[in-house]
Structures are given as structure tokens and as C-alpha cells.
Image (cartoon, rainbow, N blue to C red):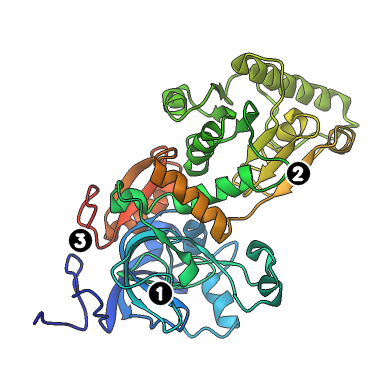
Amino acid sequence: MTETKDLYELGETPPLGHVPKQMYASLIRPERFGDPSDAFEVEVVDVPTPEANQVLVWVMAAGVNYNNVWASLGTPVDVIGARQKQGAQEDFHIGGSDASGIVWAVGDSVSSVKVGDEVVLSCGSWDESDPDIVSGGNPAFSPTFKIWGYELNYGSFAQFALVDHYQCFPKPPQHSWAAASAYMLVGATAYRQLLSWEPHVVNEGDPVLVWGATGGLGVMALQIVKARGGIPIAVVSDESKYDMCYELGAHGVINRKDPEFTHWGRLPDVDDGEAFGKWMQGVRAFGKKFWEVLGDRRSPKIVFEHPGEGTIPTSVFLCDNGGMVVICAGTTGYNADVDLRYLWMRQKRLQGSHFATTEECSGLNDMIISGSVDPVLSDVYQFDQIGEAHQAMMENRHAPGNMSILVNASDREQTSI
């Protein structure tokens, strides 16, 4: 009989289904709020016990997303304090909103997965008893909708993670643990943006403008548009990123740092003739460049947005009549200006979008399994480098694509235990 222990060192694996009392986790505590490189520290904590509808997962690898940069800084939300106000007892945060791993224990009501299943995890969580959800409402619109590993505790930066049953999806068998851990948050977010806001969905031949095309969201968006038969036009900040965009399916690429584009940032007051005239000169140059790389005098049917403040004025101007600007973040700031004349007279749509539903996660996962979308794994860090990985993300020093942390996996290529 295999000996069981109350704590397993990193690199050790318990017998399948044996849940030790404690685990190693990379924690954020309030007294360490600040730069990510200082905020995360590996400690020993108790392993959480799954409730009736929950699943305990032995984490093989974890994805890195910007939400835990915010968690480490303690701003714009102190996630620990926010949970304590709602009754939580833990004075720490275990982040990580993406993961691949193995189902290790399940609650009494769980039938969708079983111990030993290899899974990837979604970060979308909600209260299944919410009356709106029970009556068929979209869970993403529920006031109970939260992001696991950020708003909720016991994320993937630990030997074990705790999720609800519907957050588990089959691991793509062809991908390593590291690659499988890195795509769900950004991929499902992009999937919802591009395919769920009827009638503004990507169709055959539709030009689509993709901002930040070599970031985590952008690399997913390029591939989804291409797989749907759309025409993705990528926007990047450096010509060194062009080849990657073309490899991922871009029809054309625009360098937003070209000197002719002088209009980034907030929209000037329309009554300031000189400033607004200069802005119009810059945005028209960008529109002309879009036509040039597209090879056609058409405007984008969909603009895939996440920078926000620095780009929304351009996105709204450039979007086709009756088209849609869809946004899921504000990486350059939250104060986004819109010239309403172009919005209402050209009947354009400005749509907010936040993560994804179970069906959308499943749709994205099917695309990964089929090979039509790749995780685009870039940097891979060790478990004790979680702070360093988030510091690199905050300072934009990371490689294009998606990042992963090896938790219980031994190396970048490992596919099974």
C-alpha cells in the first residue's frame, strides 16, 4: 500500500484520490500588497474541502492573467478585504484564473466529472440557484457572476484548486499541461466577444480589426476570426511582431506607432477646431492604412477592443455603419470618449463583454481540441516564480502569447502524470 502523508512536497504526487490536509500555495497577503515580485510568497495552508457541487483539482499548471497583477497591488480592488466583508475568514488570496490538472475529489452532487479526469478550468463562477439562471437567464448577466482566482479564492496558484463542477472541461489531449493551462480565460473571452453578440458575429468575409494582436486576447481573436472565415487585421506596436500575426492568420498588420498616427488618447473637444482637426487627420490616416492592408475600401464589421481609453475614439470612428465595437477591458484607461454623432448617425454598436458562459467555454475548448485554435504558449515559469511572472506582465516584458506556471507538472512538455 502506498504511504499517504498530510503534505506533499512540490514534485511529489499523492495517490490518486488521496487528499492531504495541507498544500503549498503562492499567497498574497494584505501586508505584502505592492509590486507582484514582492506580493506573492509560497506558504503552507489547509486544503479546502469541496462542497456538494464542487470539484478539487490537482493543479498541473496555471495560466497567468493581468487580474492577479491587480490582486497583488491591492487595487483597484482589495480582493481579500472585499471577500472578508462578505463573511470570508481567509486573510490571504490564492490567485490563478486558468489551470490544467486532474480531478482529485468531487462533492456528493457532482456527476459531470470523476476522479482521475484530466481537465482545464474556466474562471467563470455563479450561483446556480439564482432565480434568473434557474429560469434560463444568461449566467454572465447574473449579479452572482464572479471570476474564480480573483474575486473568488482558492485559484490555481496552489497544489490544489477548488472550483464548481461546471468550470471543468476536457483537457486537449495533444497539448502539454503548460499549454492547456494558458488559453481558457483569454480564449473564451475572445470567443464571446466575436461570436455571441447577435447579429454582430464574425461571418465569412467580414473584416475584423484586432487591437493588441500578439497579446493573450489578441492571439486568440486572430485565430477565431480566421477559423470563422473572417478577415483579421492586426494592430501591434512593433514590426518585429508582424510575422507572428501572419502565422496566426492575420490578413494584414498595422503598426500603431507609425509616425503618421498622432491621435491616440482621449478625444479632443469637438469645439476645439485645431486640436480636433489634428485628431481627424490622424484617425483618417489610420483608416486609410486599414484599407491599404485589407486591400479593399471596406471598414471593419467588428472591432475587437480591450485597450479602451487610448483607442476607443478610433474604434468608433473606424467601425462600419451598423457594425460593432466590442470591449472586454481598459488596459490603457477607463475614460473612453465617443463622438456620439458617429455612433448614432451611423448606427454603430458599442458593446461591453465580460468573460464567458459554460457553452462559450465549451465552444472555445472544442476549437482548441480540433486544432483550429492554438494556445500560443510563450513564457513558462516555475512555481516559485509566480511573482516574477506577474511583474513581467505588469511591465510588459513578457513574450507575445500566453504565459504558464508549472505547479505539479515537472516541465513544459509533460502531458500526463
Task: Give the position of the N terminus as an image quadrant.
Answer: bottom left
User: Percent x, y for residue 376?
Assistant: 39, 40
Residue receiving disc 2: 350
Circle on res. 55: 1
Residue 199: x %, y % from top left: 73, 42
Residue drawn at (47%, 28%) of the image: 245
The secondary structure type at the circle numbered 2 is strand
Q: Residue at x 55, y 81 (%)?
A: 84
- Neighbour tally class for label 2: few under 14, some 14-19, many 20 plus, Cα within 10 Å: some
Q: Position of residue 162 (x, y in %)?
A: 41, 73
Which of the two discs, 2 and 1, labels the residue nearer the N terminus? 1
Q: Check the image and name the residue furthest to the left.
A: 1
Q: CA distance from mark 2 to mark 1?
A: 37 Å
Front-lying residue, 46 or 78: 46
Task: From the viewer's perspective, tell me whether residue 173 is left or right of residue 278.
Answer: left
Look at discs 3 and 2 and give the one toward the viewer: 3
Judge from the rendering whether residue 198 lies leftward or rightward of residue 179; answer left or right: right
Q: Under tag 3, what secondary structure?
A: loop
Q: Tell me the residue that label 3 is attached to.
A: 417
Q: Secondary structure at mark 1?
A: strand
The kind of residue tagged 2 is: Leu
Left or right: 325 in relation to 108: right
Mark closer to the observer (2, 1): 1
Would residue 39 be found to the left or right of residue 291 on screen?
Answer: left
Image x and y of residue 147, in percent: 54, 64
Q: Amino acid at mark 1?
A: Val
Q: Residue at 19% of width from left, 74% of height from top?
A: 14
Residue 337 in view of the camera: no
